[in-house]
Image (cartoon, rainbow, N blue to C red):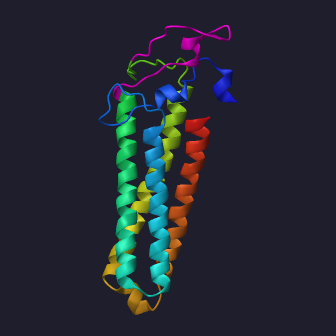
């Protein structure tokens, strides 16, 4: 509802159309879709690690935990690129820029963003975007740290000596929660 209640809210297709290495090419939401795919695939690798733990397969747990960690770092790298791109420059058309009295303006041009001044009008968009994605990113980073700890514990045989891989499953639940939260962030923040 907030998106449609203010003329200063950016048009999602214009803000989120950047992709690393494709300067000037319009690819609406492709990069964010890739980020989502990476995070969901890391959830799949976590499921495989948990399943390997149930089978007491140390090598399988270590392998799939490593892939989960790589996925987490890849997502965080993508988020860092997205943040730096938004801070240094991106397309920033707002609804107020392209709509006059409910009619789309013809021949509008989108210029690069510069967060040294507030091109969004009220700071609601930038504050909300950086808070939500930053808070989620912090939890992804925390999950990666936990996954690294579990990875080393599994690699050194700690869980094999205990006779169970319960901690892999517990950390897996946290990782799935972080992934689920991203699905909601993606849906309600990027798409709507």
Quarter holding residue 190: top right
Asked whether 85 or 126 is in front, the reply is 85
Q: Report the quarter where the C terminus lies.
A: top right
Q: Is residue 134 visible?
A: no
Locate residue 132 relative to residue 82 in the image: left or right. right
Look at 54% across and 12% down and name the residue there: 97
Q: Residue 59's spot in the image, x, y percent?
A: 34, 81
Q: Is residue 130 above or below residue 173?
A: above
Quarter holding residue 7: top right
Q: Is residue 24 above or below residue 106?
A: below
| Residue 102 shown in magenta | yes
Q: Residue 130's spot in the image, x, y percent?
A: 48, 37
Kindly report the secondary structure that dominates the magenta region of the rendered protein. Answer: loop
Asked whether 1 or 23 is in front, the reply is 23
| Residue 47 shown in magenta | no
Look at 34% across and 68% down and name the residue there: 66
- Number of marks in picture: 0
Give the residues in magenta: 88-111
């Amino acid at each position: 509802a907030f998106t449609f209640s203010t003329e200063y809210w950016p048009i999602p297709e214009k803000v989120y159309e950047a992709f690393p290495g494709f300067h000037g090419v319009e690819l609406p939401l492709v990069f964010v879709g890739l980020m989502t795919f990476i995070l969901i695939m890391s959830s799949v690798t976590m499921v495989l690690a948990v399943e390997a733990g149930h089978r007491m397969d140390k090598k399988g747990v270590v392998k799939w935990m490593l892939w989960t960690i790589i996925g987490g770092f890849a997502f965080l790298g993508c988020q860092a690129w997205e943040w730096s791109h938004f801070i240094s420059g991106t397309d920033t058309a707002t609804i107020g820029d392209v709509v006059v009295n409910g009619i789309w303006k013809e021949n509008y041009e989108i210029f690069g963003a510069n967060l040294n001044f507030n091109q969004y009008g009220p700071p609601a968009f930038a504050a909300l975007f950086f808070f939500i994605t930053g808070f989620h990113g912090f939890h992804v980073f925390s999950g990666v740290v936990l996954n690294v700890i579990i990875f080393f514990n599994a690699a050194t045989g700690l869980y094999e000596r205990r006779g169970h891989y319960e901690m892999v499953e517990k950390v897996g639940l946290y990782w799935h929660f972080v992934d689920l939260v991203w699905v909601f962030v993606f849906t309600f923040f990027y798409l709507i």
